[in-house]
Image (cartoon, helix red, strand yellow):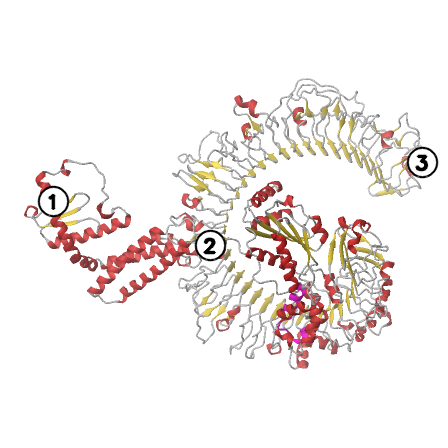
Amino acid sequence: MHDHVYVQFNSKLINKWARVKYQNTDVLRSLDASKAQSWIVAISDEDEEKEEDGSVGVGGDAVGGRELHDDDFVSDEEQVEDIAVSVVAKLLEYIAQPILQPFDYIIHHDRNINRLRTQIACLENTLSMYQPQVDVATRNGDIVLPVVQDWINKATALATESHNLLSDCDHSCPHLKLMYKTSRDARKKRMAVSELLESGKFDIFSHPAHLPSIWPSSNVDGFESRKGLLRLVMEALEDDSVNVIGVYGMGGIGKTTFVEQVAKQADANQLFDEMVMVVVSHKPNLRKLQGDLAEMLELNLKEEGVLLRTARLRERLNQVKRILIILDDVWTPLDLRTIGIPQSKGCKIILTSRSLDVCNAMNTERNFHMDVLSQAESWNLFRKMAGDAVDSDDLNPIATKVAKRCSGLPLAIVTVARALRHRSKHAWRDALRHDVEECFRMHDVTRDFLLSVASKGLYIFLEKMMPGYIDSHNENKFRNAYAISLVLNDLEEFPVDIDCPNLQLWRLEGSLGFVEFSGNFLNGLKELKVVLMHHVSIPSMPSSFLALRKLLTLCLEHCKLGDLSQIKELKQLEILSFMHSDIERLPKEVGELSRLRLLDLTDCRNLSVIPFGVFSKLSNLECLYMLNSFVQWGFEGQNISQNQATLGEFRNLSRLNTLEMRVPDVNFFPKDVLFDNLVRFKIFIGMDVSQVISYSYPKTLRLALHQGLSLHSGIYKLLKGAQHLILDYSIINYLEDLNSIVYDLRKGFRHLRCLEVYGYTGVESLIDTNIFPVLEKLKVVSAADLKMICYDHLPDQSFCELQELMLSILPELTCLWMDPLGNVCLHNLRTLFVSDCHKLKDLLSQSTAKDLSQLQKLYVSSCEDLNVILYKDQGVSSSQIVLSNLKSIKLEFLPTLKSFCPEADVSLASNDIQEPLFNSKVDFPSLEELTLRELHSVKEIWRSQLSAANFRSLRILIIFWCDSLVLVFPSYMQYMLQNLEILSIEWCDSVEEVCELHNENDAQIAALPCVRDLTLGKLPLMKHLWWNIDPHAYTSLQNLNSLHIYECDALIHLFSGNAMKSLVHLQELKVRSCMMLKTIFSNEGEDGVIVLSELCSVKLDDLPELLTFCQGSTSLEFPSLDMIEIKSCPKMKVFVDSDVRQGGNHGIISRPLFNEKVALPNLQALYLNGLASLDGIWHTELLDKSFSKLQVINVMNCGQLLDLGPLNMLSRLQMLEVIQVTNCASLERIFTLKHPQIQKYISSVSLINLVDLVLENLPNLRQIWWDRTPNHTHRFPRLAAMEVENCDRLDCIFPASVARGVPQLQKLKVYSCMSVKAIVGNNGQDLDPNDMFLPQICSIELENLPNVVVFCTRMSVLRWLSLKELRIVSCSKMGSFVSTSSLHGEGSGGFIEENLLNNIQGFFTEKIVFPSLEKLRVDNLECVNALWHTATITESFCQLRVLEVRNCDNLLQLIPSSLLSRMHNLEELHVNQCRLLEKIVEKLEEDLGEKVILPKLHTVQLINLPRLASFFSGDRSYEWPNLERFALEDCPSMKTFSSVVQVVPKLTAVEVGYGLQVWNGDLESTIKHLFRS
């Protein structure tokens, strides 16, 4: 006890019982010792409580301050008396305390024990909150803080000791000595727990671990050649004069492994402070390279712009005094400065490449060539990887040959040796023949090089040549090359007759489509052994091929092939591949290649002819690949088929060991072709079927037949040896044929490991499993009559090798098998898939399920009558089932499923008794993913009595449309689901609670603390969310990344204030269609700032009652939020509403959406749609940097909005690229001046990054641009596209001051703006004739502008060099595109209405120059009587391709003849409904009559031209070499086409409407005939 207790026996104090305070000391005055004792004990207990809450100072030093009164002062006599009392009391203290203390422990034994229980419960709850966070950190590779781990260890130990103490108390008999001891120990433990809880308040539990070392742990494999090279490279690294080092050599030679060893050695020698390594690859991606570098440097590279990313990387690298950067697999030269790699003294660079030229181009100062391994080194590596078995007498000769085939390439050696480790002698022989090629397909050592290895080529160097290096200057570099690989656009880039005396491999690939190959590019390359071409077109075999007498391998893959008959000259050829090529006929001359060992015709889909006799001549053929290729086999013995190859020719292929092909009919197989030597085959017999099959076994036979199987020796051999058998679309009783086959085989399918059966009827069960002793996979699909998989009386250990079982679309299946003796053994089963078996009531027996220790995936779907998964065996006592390896369960569309494994027999259970889906009978310790979809009978998921390890590993839980479910997680389940990361609960109409929290102890549980992705949807009865119950909030949401809530109509708000603070990792928030939701965050009565540091995206949609995002006086900061989308929230006006009292109802007070209460420094996109109450977006005062990164603003259907914001916002919006405003009926201006006194400072601010501007359906918009000062150029330097539609109060689109400031505008669309008089207005001022506006315009569309008079006023030439498309429709007052006179008058645009009908000399005047215009359409221009001025500038309109003129009733002439003669690119001419038009082409006086050619014109259409008399006037002759379509409809006045004969060689008819055509020998005669008719 910290306070002193005085007991005085004094005559003055007899019968007085009082407490007085003197220097914070409790005093008892009493003569009754028993009362004194009880008082002492009471005080002791009271003091303990004070000690716990910290209200009492140690040793009585802490004196509470209060106001003093007279009673607090004593007289001298009393003071002397008190001193005496104090002395006596002190003496009694030392005497009484040891005597009375034991009585205290005994009297308060139960209370001390209960208080310990309470404290231990608090400690364990805290421990349960902390442990998952530590586990998550550990799984993520983070380092747990030592203080945290030490606290957890102490807490665990203390909890264990306390439980042992409490257990002893529960089981012991009352005994005073024992009670004293346990009470004393309990109090000490309680005090220790209190101290531990006080010290265990952590904000941070871990920190990111340093990146693990990527350098290998082993040394350079003991190769002397590599060790010497390593020494040289290390010397270069230590040389201060060398900064860039190159290591080059062919692919697969071990460059990557070598530079990793270099880095490891440099690390051991402490040469560098940091080392990083990135892979560049064939097609380098700058952003990925920068990202990989930043990740290894532990740099958070958030910048989007390339320049900023480069600068950040350079800054980070310059901070390191000594750094090594390894750039691996560089194919083309890189600009290191662009990446951000500084070329400073402290930065050393090692790059690896296949090309020395790439190294030199990157200014390497030392280059090291890496060669292949020596024969001894190759064998040592091969032996190490393959194991000691290669030393045995029977394997050693074969292994030695296989190792030699790898040609000293480490990658090839390791890959092949590991693949053959522990394999049989037979497998080694198979590898010697062709498996080397298969193993190599896993690496970018290209297939062509693998084939070259198979053809015994030895290579020293494979150089990757790019076009930039191939010139005469570099020809000497080819002299020593053994192999060249080229990627070219055109063979002209490669020099002819280069001198390559050692060249053995040539590879050519077309980089952009097919490269035409012809000529003599291979002349002089007499040593060539391998030629590989990809994406090359070869119309015929070049003569240079025929001189390649040593050629062993020719691969023409993905090529277009023509006549290859001269291939017969390549007598030494052993490997020939046309894979994926376009070839229709295999030359018969291929049969003369007598040494051919491999022929690959895979995926030659157009191959339809293989002459008879080709295969029979290829007696040395070992491998034939023909899948997805030739199928037009001939029938043996029928003369009509002798032009096509037959399978009978295979009798002569005695060495054939690998065969892949499809035969459409089993009758093509001769009975005496036995395929005795096949060790690998994929043979498809029958029709082509669409199933996607995975071919994992070397011997695959696929039968897809509509007739019975005719068994003979050839088919018998294939069936007997098949490892993978596929039966497709079998006929009724087809399996009876298989029964007869089995009877003949006697021992069954001894090698069959995978059986797939598709679509047969008439069979109720499969054959006895005894004939499938090694079956690993069984798949049965669409068997209409199948009732069970196997007959009853199954032999012992049936299905013991089965790993995968898939049953689908079996409508009559009632059980898998009858197994009363329990002989089915599924101890190897990994995957069980059952779907669409509607009569199946249960799946497996509980006794069988005990063997499912290896089961990893369970998927049951669409079984209408299924009641249970594991049914109870009759008469068999069931014990605990542990599915220890089960990772994933999916139970979907099972309307009658009630229990996974019922405790009672389902057939005997009462319908009133509802078992939960999961109970204590089955444990799922490793389950990670659980999906429950449309389980309409499940009312409860979990049983309370589950083992502690059950569902502990569950990471993903998806519950969908379980409409009987009421509660998802009872309180007892929340301890088990501490690792749950992804949770989705949707369409569960009866769910009222997700997590059950009924009392304070529940709230202290860490409910779902690791959930990072959460979806709650269509839960109409859910009224509250568990995270809003304090103090539960923080532990529930601290790891949440993504939250999606929709159609939860009972929710009023989503987050309380405390819950809001816990969203430290929330990145995405989506809320949709919650009808009663009023606010997202409710934080009423709390001030301060809440920072949601990782939130990136907010989407709110269809929330009719939503008033605000956050309600309360809290300020919000979103440093990472880059996108906000708010849609269909008609009552929302303010994002953060601090006026709690009024609840968001502020009458007619105008308040913007965003104010100083919200900080959005990173917002890049803002979408507002359907905010009917919104009258403003931005307040005039905002937090610093808010909206400074905004790039896109899209506002739609905001009927009360007057403007986007005040003008002072413009200085913040300098990153804005897109503005789109649509259907805002009240909007008058885009930006408005709120404070006129600052106009001169802000009105001239421009949006320098604005690219796209769209304004649609804004009937009250009066002004687009905020500064219309005539003499000031308003700059929008990046504006590229602008669209204005249905803005009826605008008088012009651009003031001249703005038109001058949009130099990059390319697309302009103006539709249905009723008051617009000019597109470019002059503000009542004369324009400078030298003004340049819209210089980059490419496309202009003007439509339905009834008051527009001209596009602009222009005194000088209007020259638009980029304009390609011009469309003007329904601009009835527009008489001229450009007015050349100054038009002053009243009106906001400075224009007056004029009747220009009688004055127009041409819509396009001589002042207009459009040299690039390709498409021109004019429609409904009532004031135009001539489209072009006769004196158009020569270069103008010369690129016009399409001309359309419609509904111009006053048009008199269309094209001057001088202009038409320059329209050499015109392709289409359409003239419709021009009432006064008399001629299409008008003769000019200066016409000289010379012939004009219109080479590209192919279509002329003249419709409804009542006064058109002729096409031409004058005597100029025209030639129309490509005119194919001429339509003439409703032109009654047209008498003649022209007075001069026209040349139209391709025209054969004139279309006259209604699908009719007329032709009278030539065009002129036809026109005259039509006129007379």
Report the residue at 68% width, 77% height from top.
720
- Amino acid of disc 2: Ile
Which quarter of the rendered picture does the C terminus lie within?
Answer: top right
Which percent across, then down, holds residue 16? Answer: 9, 47
Q: Are marks 3 and 1 in contact (CB under 8 Å)?
A: no
- Callout 3: few (<14), some (14-19), or many (20+) C-alpha neighbours within 10 Å? some
The mark closer to the camera, 2 or 3, is: 2
Residue 832 placement: quadrant? bottom right
Residue 1412 left/right relative to 1020: right
**Residue 1317 visible in the shown view:** no
Question: Marks 3/1: CA distance?
Answer: 144 Å
Q: Secondary structure at mark 1?
A: helix
- Amino acid of disc 1: Ile
**Residue 122 visible in the shown view:** yes
Residue 756 left/right relative to 554: left
Report the residue at 45% width, 49% height from top.
1038
The mark that comes first in sequence, 2 or 3, is 2
Mark linked to residue 143 = 2
- Callout 1: few (<14), some (14-19), or many (20+) C-alpha neighbours within 10 Å? few
- Residue on which the image places disc 1: 83
Judging depth in this view, the residue of 1544 and 53 nearest the camera is 53
Magenta-highlighted residues: 410-428
Q: Secondary structure at mark 3?
A: loop
